[in-house]
Amino acid sequence: MLRVHPQLKDERLLALFERGVERQWPSALLDWSQEERWDRRDLEALAAIITPVYLGEQTAMLGVSAILPRLLTAGETEAALYLASMGLDEARHFRNLSRFFDRHQVTPWPTRRLPEMWRYHARLLQSGDPIDWLWGILISDLFARLFYGRLREQYPDLLIGRLARRTLVDEARHQAFADRYLTPRLVGVDAERRRELLGLRDDLFRTMDALTHRLAGPLGDLGWSGTAFLAELWDDTERWAGRLGLTDAGATPAAWRDGEDQESKSAKGAVSSTRVP
């Protein structure tokens, strides 16, 4: 139930909210007029591998709109305040990537070429529980940190690298929020609840594995290894799982590959390096 004048007591979440407000930034801070010379094949490959992240920014807005009312009606007003600022971050990231596509006259891949994207984001919202969603969003934010970090390192002087550098500041703040929200709520969770959350992790990794196989061609064009990327993401995720008390020791990547379903296996067999029309 909403309260007219709720007592705001969680100073750490309030501090994150204030930081989120203070560190909003307009896309006009970037120089969108700078001329850039791209190899067309590389630019189209970049558009392809950005596609899952691009959809992720949109579905994160959808997730915020779904979870925020639950937090407010549960009396978790400080968390709801922060989540509102996070929604604006996701909207800005979406707007910036849209502008990048338009600026360079490239298009993301359609969902018919990456159908697992919908599976991934539908899985995040399957339960509607804020804890499940934030655990999944934490994994997505760790993915984004690695992804934008690679762009920053590979293209430091180009528009996409400068955009990635600013976006990384937002992603770090999102991870801090997930840490602050999840840590006290996962203390002493029972074995069944841990299995549920680790099952969500494994489902998400299986979907990402299928996506990296579909994107093998563009990843190769840019010199990226999907296998190495997922291995690094797994290590990051396992560190967080241990920190949150979900695992006692690091699991191996086989933990999620062992449960690979037939649809994921079929996706690997259907890999195509056909370029974007």
Image (cartoon, rainbow, N blue to C red):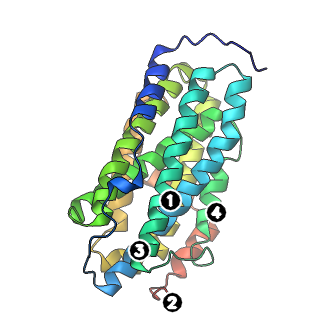
Q: Quadrant of residue 217?
A: bottom left
Q: How busy is the neighbourhood of tag 3: few (under 14 within 10 Å), some, or many (20 plus)?
A: few
* Mark positioned earlier in the residue sequence (4 or 3): 3
Residue flagged by tag 3: what amino acid is it?
Answer: Arg
Q: Position of residue 240 (x, y in %)?
A: 41, 36
Where 91 sits versus 82, above or below? below
Q: Nearer the viewer, residue 32 or 72?
A: 32
Q: Is residue 83 visible?
A: yes
Where 216 sits versus 171, above or below? below
Q: How busy is the neighbourhood of tag 4: few (under 14 within 10 Å), some, or many (20 plus)?
A: some
Q: Secondary structure at mark 1?
A: helix
Q: Read off the residue under disc 3.
A: 103
The residues tagged by marks 3 and 1 sit, at their Cα atoms, a distance apart of 12 Å
Disc number for residue 95:
1
Q: Secondary structure at mark 2?
A: loop
Q: Read off the residue under disc 4.
A: 118
